[in-house]
Amino acid sequence: MTLNGWLQIAFFLLAIAAVTPVLGRFMARVFNRERTWFDPVLGPIERLIYRSTGVDAAREMPWTEYAAAVLLFSAVSMLVLYLIQRTQQWLPWNPQGFGPVAPDLAFNTAASFTTNTNWQAYSGESTMSYFTQMAGLAYHNFVSAAVGISVAFAFLRGVVQKEKDTIGNFWVDLVRCLLWLLLPICIGGALALVSQGVVQNLRPYDKVAVVDPQTVSVPDADGKPRTEVRSEQTIAQGPVASQEIIKQLGTNGGGFFNANSAHPFENPTPLSNFLAMFGIFAISAGLTHALGTMTGSRAHGWAVWGAMAFLFLAGVTTAYWAEARGNPLLTTVGADQTVSATSPGGNMEGKEVRFGIANTALFATATTDASCGAINGWHDSFTPIGGLVTLGNIQLSEVVFGGVGAGLYGMLVYIILSVFIAGLMVGRTPEYLGKKIHAFEVQMAMLSVLIFPLLILVFTAISSVSPDSATSGILNPGPHGLSEILYAFSSGAANNGSAFGGLTVNTPWYNRTLAVTMLFGRYFMIIPPLAIAGSLGRKKRVPPSPGTFPVTTPLFAALLVSVIVIVGALTFFPALSLGPIVEHFLMTNGQVF
Amino acid sequence: MEFMMLDAAFVLVTVAFFVLSIGYVAGCERLKRGDR
C-alpha cells in the first residue's frame, strides 16, 4: 500500500461528499416539480411528450398503479429489446454485418438491460450491431436507471406525505428524470470522456498490420491443431463514449467492449477512470441528501450517507490491503511483489498497469457497492480476500450507495428493520420520521430481504450439483469454482452485472436461470418498497415522543450498519465459507486454484 | 423453426413473469387491507 494510493481513495470519497448536496438538492427540486435552470428549455419538451403520449401530468397514482406502470413499461421495453437483437441483421448501423443474437442470449440480455443489471454473456464488439448498442442497450441504460430513481422518489413521497393515497405519477417521474437529470449530465460527461480518448463514431472496424506477426495454433475443420501466421489485427470501435457515461452514471455497467472499463477505448486515462468511479456513486450519494431535503431532516440524510461511507471504507480498505499484499505463494517462487519505482507491487494479475492496485481495488469496491458492474480489472484474479470483498458487497444487497434509486430504497428497507429492532428494544411501537411502523411494513421489508438470498442460494446450490448444464462451465476447480457460480447468481439477483469470470455463462442453463434471477431480483424487490411507500403515505404523522428512536445520530448509523452486516453475514456466511474464505486458508497452506 | 419456437417461448415467459408481478402487487395490497 502506498500513500499515493490512500490519497487517491480519500480524494475520491471527498469528491463524492462534495457532490452529494449539489445533486441531492437538484434532484429534490426536479422530482418535486420545482423550478430549475433547465425549465425554459426542457419544460416545452416535457409538455410535448405528455401531450403526444396522452399522459395527464397532474394526476397522481396510488402505489398499486405506480407499480403496474413500472411493470408495464418494463415488460414492453424488454420485449422490444429482445426483438431488436433478434432482427439486428435487417436493421441499420450494422457495418460488421452481425447476424441475429441467439434466442437464449437475447432473452438473457433483454432481461439484463431491462433490470439495470447489464450482465453480459456476450462480447459486445463481436455480437451487437451499433443500432443494438445504441437503440437497444444504451436506451435501457437510461430508462432502467430512471425507473430506479423514480421508485426511490416514490418511496420518499410515501415517507413524507400525510394521509394521502398517492405517491406520484410514474410517467412524470420517468420523463423528468431523463430530461432534467440523466441526459444533461450524460451529454457533458460523454464529451469529457471523448476529450480523454474514448472513441465515438459509427465507422466499420479497422484492420491494421501488426508490427510483429504472430504464429498461433488453431484447430482445423477436423479439430486437429494447425499453425497460422497472424499479421493483421481488427480494431473494434463505435459509439462508445455515449454509452460509457450512462453505463457509469446509471450504475448499469454493461460495457461496449468485452473488457469493459479495462479496455483503452472505454477507459483510457487515470482521469477517465476517476470520472467512471465518480459517476458510479454520484447520483446514489445525492439521493441520501434528497432524502434529508424531502424529509426536512438533513441530519438524517447525512447519517445514512455516513453509514454507507463507513461500509464503503471497510470494503475498499480490505480490498486494497489484500491486493497490495499480493499472493504469498508467488513470493516463495521468487516473484517480486514489493512496490518500487517501476512496479506497483502486490497482486497485479488481471489488473491494468495504468490503473495499478489502488485504483483497481477502489473501482472494484465501488462497482460492487453500487449495482454498477463495470470493471477495470478481473475480479476472478483478485486474492481470495479481495474477491470476498466484491462478493460480500453484492451480498449486502448493494445498499452501500447502491444502484441509482435501488440503493436508497434498499437502504430504506433496512432503516425500517433498524427502527423496528430499536422499537423492540425499548418496548414501543417503532416510528420512522413520525410514521408508526406496523406489521405490514415489516412484512414487506422482510419479503424484500428474503427474496434476495433465496434466489442466490437456491440457484447456486442447483448449479453446483448439475454436472452437465452448470459445473461444466467452471474453469477453476474447488472453492474458486463455487465462488464463480455464487458470484454469478449474486450479481444477477442484485442487478449488479459484473462477472467474477472463469465461468462459461453463454449456455442455455446460465442464460435462462440468470435471466429469471435478474427479473425476480429487480421487480420482486421493487414492489415491497412501493407497498411500504403506499402504506406509509396513508398514515398520520405523529410528533416525536421520549420513546422515538432518533434517526440522525451516530448511534442510528451504527445500528443501521449492524443490521445490514448481520443480515448479510447470517445469510451468506456459510456459502462464503465454502468459497473465498476456505480458498484464503488453502492459499496460506500452499494451494491455489 | 426451432428458433421461432424458442422466440415464442421467451416472449411467453416474459409476459408470464410480468403478469405474475402484477399478481404480486395485488397480493401485497390484499395483505395490507387485511392488516387494517
Image: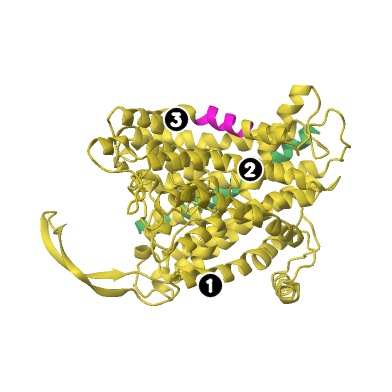
Chain colours: A yellow, B green
Lower position in the chain sequence, tag 1 or tag 2: 1
Task: Please rate how many residues cluster around mark 1, counting C-alpha atoms within 10 Å: few if below 14, some from 14 to 19, many from 20.
Answer: some
Residue A107, given in percent of the width and then of the height, sits at 45, 54
Residue at 14% of width from left, 54% of height from top? A223
Lower position in the chain sequence, tag 1 or tag 3: 1
The chain under label 1 reads A
Image-quadrant location for residue A174: bottom right
A126 versus A433 height, above or below: below
Residue at 40% of width from left, 42% of height from top? A323
Residue A325 seen in this snapshot: yes
Q: Which residue is mark 1?
A: A191
Q: Which residue is mark 3?
A: A575
Q: Secondary structure at mark 2?
A: helix
The chain under label 3 reads A
Bounds of the magenta span?
Answer: A563-572
Q: Which residue is mark 2?
A: A410
In the displayed image of the protein, which residue is found farthest to the front? A341
Which amino acid type corresponds to the residue marked 3 in the rendered image? Answer: Ala
Lower position in the chain sequence, tag 3 or tag 2: 2
Residue at 70% of width from left, 59% of height from top? A22
In this view of the protein, which residue sits in the foreground, A158 or A334?
A: A334
Question: Distance between the Cα atoms at labels 3 and 2?
Answer: 22 Å
Residue A73 seen in this snapshot: no
